[in-house]
Image: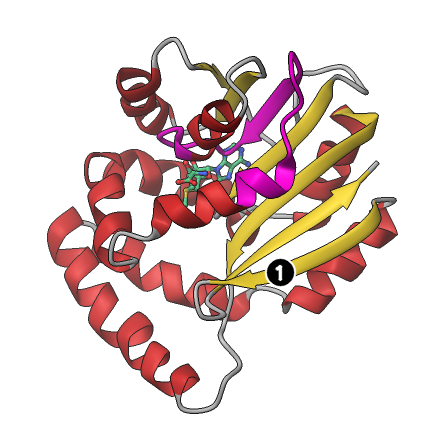
């Protein structure tokens, strides 16, 4: 099975427990970090924003909350995730099915593009950034949020005990998909360091690229402009 097929079926399989697991895993902080990332996106008045891999729509809704006049479209290929998102955010977010590596969208369309917790899940992160760059308007801004390994000694080891050992057991038990919560820490270990993500964004053509560590260094928010 290729990575996209696995990832799509995994998220459809855990959709009913996805929000609960996020709350448990982050001790209730997952919405705060999306709000912080959404603030960095600075959604403009009457603008158009795209939330790639929107899942159950929380990042899209955070953008809408900051700037209710900005129209937000969420795209994902896991329909079950978006079905739950529609029940939460009907009216605030428009949902559309699509693969973020092959967006069925014209160039230079969106004022803002955001995505949360997906970069390590795609089969080709370079293509993901190239697609974001393509559909972003000149002058637009892209913001990506992703889990990263903390660097601080001792805290790094404490976090690893939780993230690599305790969390997969709890997540597997609650979701009925133990593979999904073994995959999660593995995908973080296998992913690029924040500096390499920022370099990749610059190679694609993004300007003013920066990244910010959040939540005690366990998350990174990447910002770039076109
Ligand atoms: C960890 S969830 C994140 C959901 C949401 N962004 C959030 O903040 O909670 C990852 C999401 O990425 C989606 N995804 C992964 N690869 C994708 C792709 N190539 N195209 C569209 N969606 C994708 C999955 O279906 C899943 O809903």
Residue occupying the point 71% across, 34% down:
132
Relative to 55, residue 69 above or below = above
Name the foreground residue: 90 vs 37: 37
Residue occupying the point 51% across, 28% down:
66
- Left/right placement of residue 161 relative to residue 189 reads left
Relative to 158, residue 149 above or below = above
Residue 18 position, x and y percent, is: 26, 42
- If the image is split into quadrants, where does the C terminus sit? top right
Q: In which quarter of the image is residue 47?
A: top right
- Left/right placement of residue 134 relative to residue 42 reads right
Residue 46 position, x and y percent, is: 65, 11
Colour pattern of the rendering: secondary structure
Residue occupying the point 39% across, 47% down:
32
**Residue furthest out toward the top:** 91
- Left/right placement of residue 171 relative to residue 4 reads left
- Left/right placement of residue 177 relative to residue 163 reads left
Question: Which residue bears the numbered disc 1?
Answer: 212
Name the foreground residue: 32 vs 196: 32
Residue occupying the point 51% across, 66% down:
148
Q: Quadrant of residue 84?
A: top left
Asked whether residue 71 is in view, the answer is yes
Residue 43 position, x and y percent, is: 63, 27
């Amino acid at each position: 099975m290729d990575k996209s097929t696995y990832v799509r079926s995994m998220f459809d399989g855990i959709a009913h427990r996805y929000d609960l697991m996020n709350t448990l895993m982050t001790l209730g902080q997952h919405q705060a970090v999306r709000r912080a990332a959404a603030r960095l996106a600075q959604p403009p008045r009457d603008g158009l924003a795209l939330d790639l891999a929107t899942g159950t729509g929380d990042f899209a809704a955070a953008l809408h909350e900051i700037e209710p006049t900005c129209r937000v479209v969420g795209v994902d290929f896991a329909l079950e995730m978006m079905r739950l998102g529609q029940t939460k955010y009907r009216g605030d977010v428009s949902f559309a099915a699509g693969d973020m590596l092959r967006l069925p969208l014209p160039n230079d369309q969106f004022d803002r593009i955001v995505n949360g917790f997906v970069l390590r899940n795609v089969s080709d992160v370079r293509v993901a950034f190239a697609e974001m760059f393509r559909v972003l308007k000149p002058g637009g801004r892209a913001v990506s949020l992703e889990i990263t390994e903390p660097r601080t000694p001792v805290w790094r080891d404490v976090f690893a005990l939780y993230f690599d050992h305790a969390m997969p057991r709890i997540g597997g038990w609650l979701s009925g998909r133990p593979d999904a919560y073994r995959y999660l820490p593995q995908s973080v270990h296998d992913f690029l360091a924040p500096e390499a993500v920022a370099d990749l964004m610059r190679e694609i053509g993004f300007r003013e690229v920066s990244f910010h560590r959040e939540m005690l260094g366990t998350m990174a928010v990447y910002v770039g402009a076109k």
